[in-house]
Amino acid sequence: MGGIEIILGFHESFQSLYNNEDFSDLTVKCQDTQIKVHKVILACHSDHFKKMFTGEWKERTEKVIEIKDFEPLVVEAMLRFMYSFNYVGSQQKDSLFHAKVGEIADYYMVDTLKNMAAENFRSTAGWIASREELVALIEYMYKSPDLGLCDPILDRVTEKIDFLLEQDWFHDVMVSVPEFAATLVRRVHKRNPMVYRCYNCDVAMPWSSMGNNPTNCYQCNAMVRWGDADGRLHSNTLFILSVPPPTSA
């Protein structure tokens, strides 16, 4: 038997211990779900569990621990990963599920799982197909600990920003999740820098939020002031109303 066969055989045997009463010394309970596990395996993956089982925690001597802050499917995913080094099943293309797995991995300090969940999240974020999925992701990502997963969502939204800004439901999301709206404004501004456009000669001039903006057109020297002339303020282009210099007496 070659080395690969030995490793695969061990891996298969190791996976068989998941939710197996043989040698199990702990039950993880989440709502109506109960999973038989082994403390030594959990401790090898997670410093959180290691401290729990070796420190002055009541779980050190108890045979059952209850997880209340995460839903059963997410808890199962974390525990299954500890035995199989994978967790993806029917939720393979579910971005929100990967985000939730990343959150539980962050909480229990399972770094390898956290990295895998982040990679899976990034690979599925481009598949978001429904309004409901996008709204759920935005609400979840901006009301959860910062896992560094917001950028793929912002990229997806920025690609469709012109369409989305016309949708009432998207406006509602920006109102209900102001942190998302603020981040999106910065992202869109970085993508499409604002410019002045002189109404006298139509030359475009870069605008800086830091000040030091021109008071006269570079090309025709017309005096300028901020203005949204005849309502033609579009996306990221700021128009200037050119004011002719006063005539000499």
Image (cartoon, rainbow, N blue to C red):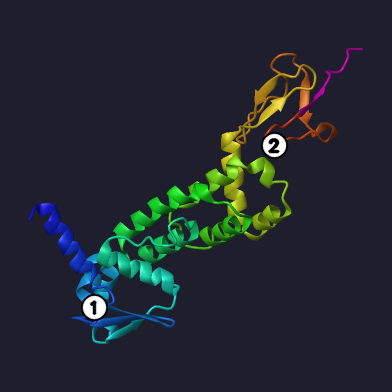
Count up the numbered dots: 2
Residue receiving disc 1: 53
The x and y percentages for residue 126 are 51, 47
- Nearest the viewer among 222 and 69 is 69
Name the residue furthest left.
1
The x and y percentages for residue 127 are 52, 49
Q: Secondary structure at mark 2?
A: loop
Q: Is residue 242 magenta?
A: yes
Looking at the image, residue 157 sits to the left or right of residue 164; the answer is left
Quarter of the image holding residue 215?
A: top right
Q: Which residue type does callout 2 highlight?
A: Ser
| Mark identifier at residue 96 | none
- Nearest the viewer among 135 and 234 is 135
Image height of 67 relative to 230, above or below = below
Q: Main secondary structure of the magenta part?
A: loop
Query: At 25% across and 71% down in the image, what residue appears?
Result: 42
Residue receiving disc 2: 235
Q: Is residue 22 visible?
A: yes
Quarter of the image holding residue 31?
A: bottom left
Image height of 17 relative to 58, above or below = above
Q: What span is colored magenta in the figure?
A: 240-249
